[in-house]
Image (cartoon, helix red, strand yellow):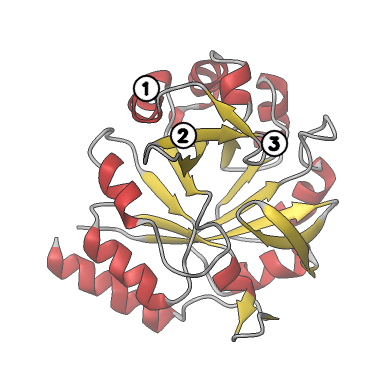
Amino acid sequence: MKLIRIIPSLLIKDNILVKGKQFKEHKYVGDVFNAVKIFSEKRAHEIQLLDITARTKNRIIDIDLIKKIRSEIFVPLSVGGGINNIDDISSLINEGVEKVVLNSCNYENEKLIEEAANKFGSQSIVVSIDVKKSEEDKYLIYSNNASKIIDIDFKSFVKNCESMGAGEILLTSIAHEGEQKGIDTKLYLEVENLTNIPIIASGGVGSVEDIINFFDSTNLNAITCGAHFVFYGKRNAVLINYPTQDEIESLMQKYEKIS
């Protein structure tokens, strides 16, 4: 059975909800607290909340904001932004966060994934990997909001995440992020068999059809949507949305029959 997950991914900057394209040109979307409440009411499978400025300001995502959100929503919460060490992770887990998302710190503290998994369990650790193709048609890893190339072989790192203790991999196509022009399916086909842990696809969703095509074309069962779930129409009017329960149930039944 293919138990699909469709996850809203929300970016925050100075505790407000923002959205950009290819990790740049972020614009104001609205109040993050109201957005997560709406997604919770719509019974999203999970909510992902990432602070895109925490690292540059040398802090972790606002604990008070997380505490407020966690007290009001009733769906699993994954959180990332500025995490550097076990104490940072502990402070988030203690507020009821189900999963922490580790990105830039993976390349600055190579033992953090293993230490965190040993202390909190692999199910709590999501390794975030951001990639973009080079001129040689090879995927390269970037960190620090896609501003810094990491000299690590992409496929080898994906393979190693499981042995390091990660429970999931969040894999983002930088070139497709926020564009709403379709998913880089080729990227996910390249890595879907490299590891036994779940890979969450991120970047490019512009319609429910994109989601369906992705699940039809790959063995993966999880995808995040950002712009598609906060914008509506050609003018990108702000409208928090998520598939209805009937649409979700229809998709679940479709993949139950396929499996």
239 is higher (above) or lower (below) than 35 = below
Residue 30 in the image: above or below residue 126: below
Q: Which amino acid, by three-letter code, is at mark 2? A: Leu
Q: Residue at x 31, y 71 (%)?
A: 212
Pointer 1 with pointer 3, Cβ within 8 A:
no
Q: CA distance from mark 3 to mark 2?
A: 30 Å
- Closer to the N terminus: mark 1 or mark 3? 3
Which quadrant would the N terminus be assigned to in this image?
A: bottom left
Asked which secondary structure carries label 3, the reply is helix
Looking at the image, which residue sits at the far left? 258
Q: Residue at x 42, y 49 (%)?
A: 200
Q: What is the distance, in whole Å, between disc 1 and disc 3 at their CAs? A: 25 Å
**Tag nearer the camera, 1 or 2:** 2
Helix or strand or loop: what does disc 2 sit on?
strand
Lower position in the chain sequence, tag 1 or tag 2: 2
Residue drawn at 43 percent across, 39 percent down: 169
Give how far across and how far down residue 213 sits, in percent.
29, 69
| Label 2 Cα neighbours within 10 Å, binned few <14 / some 14-19 / many ≥20 | some
Q: Return the residue at label 1.
A: 160
Q: Which residue is mark 3?
A: 92
Label 1 close to label 2 by CB (< 8 Å): no
Name above or below for residue 76 compared with residue 193. below
- Dot 3 or dot 2: first in sequence order is 3
Is residue 109 left or right of 83 when viewed as pictured?
left
Mark 3 nearby-residue class (10 Å; few <14, some 14–19, many ≥20): many
**Residue 173, how many percent across, how many down?**
47, 49
- Identify the residue under disc 2: 140
Question: What is the secondary structure assignment of the residue under circle 1?
Answer: helix
CA neighbours of label 1 inside 10 A, class few (<14), some (14 to 19), many (20+) = some
